[in-house]
Amino acid sequence: MIEIVVYKTAWKQEFNDLGMLLKNELDSNVKGIHHIGSTSVPGLAAKDVIDIQISVGNFSPQIIKKLAGLGFQRLEHITHDHRPAGMVKLADTELYKWFFQKTNRAVNLHVRKTGTFNQRYPLLCRDYLRHNLSAAKAYELVKINLAARFANDMDAYYDIKDPVFDVLMAGAEIWAAGIKWQPNDSDI
């Protein structure tokens, strides 16, 4: 069931705790650990799921083992991110990822290769929404309305949310170019 809840200040600390655990357990192949998604944007209502991105130099099987030891289960049927509309020439490798979930606390963990389109995309999204309250509140309203209408239909929720998000990201790209935005190396 999709439920959007008011922002919880505890989300930041939950990410910090998980991020430190990951940093201490994973090897030097990890280039960054970031808090992404709506829970990473102060004041933004969201699903109560902590999204974490691990940026890696390459997809090492050691990461799978280490994450399994920390209670993360890999969902092998989720291997690629959403392809934004109009980006038909974007190589599949630019959207490839490993996706894990933790069950004792709702956590989505995305492992993406450093320097790829999909590694940059959630960082730009997060930073743009942190700096543009109007865009953040409009996005929040879209999510609240979608969850109210499609609480039990994840496909319908994302079929509408993803293209809306692509429109939002077009503005984020203009913002990024204007300030010469670059992603930070890591949040931990």
Image (cartoon, rainbow, N blue to C red):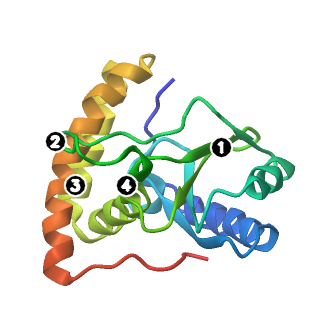
| Separation of residues labelled 1 and 4 (CA atoms) | 24 Å
Q: Which mark is residue 86?
A: 2
The residue that label 3 is drawn on is: 169
Contact between labelled residues 3 and 2, with CB atoms less than 8 Å apart: no
The amino acid pointed to by label 3 is Met
Contact between labelled residues 2 and 1, with CB atoms less than 8 Å apart: no
Q: Which mark is residue 100?
A: 1
Front disc: 4 or 2? 2
| Separation of residues labelled 1 and 2 (CA atoms) | 28 Å
Q: Is residue 119 above or below residue 88?
A: below
Callout 1 crowding tier (Cα within 10 Å): few <14, some 14–19, many ≥20: many
Residue lying farthest to the bottom in this orientation: 180
Q: Residue at x 70, y 58 (%)?
A: 60
Q: Residue at x 55, y 75 (%)?
A: 187
| Separation of residues labelled 2 and 3 (CA atoms) | 13 Å
Dot 3 falls on a residue whose secondary structure is helix
Measured from the top left, where is residue 136 in percent x and y? 26, 56
Q: Nearer the viewer, residue 119 or 166?
A: 119
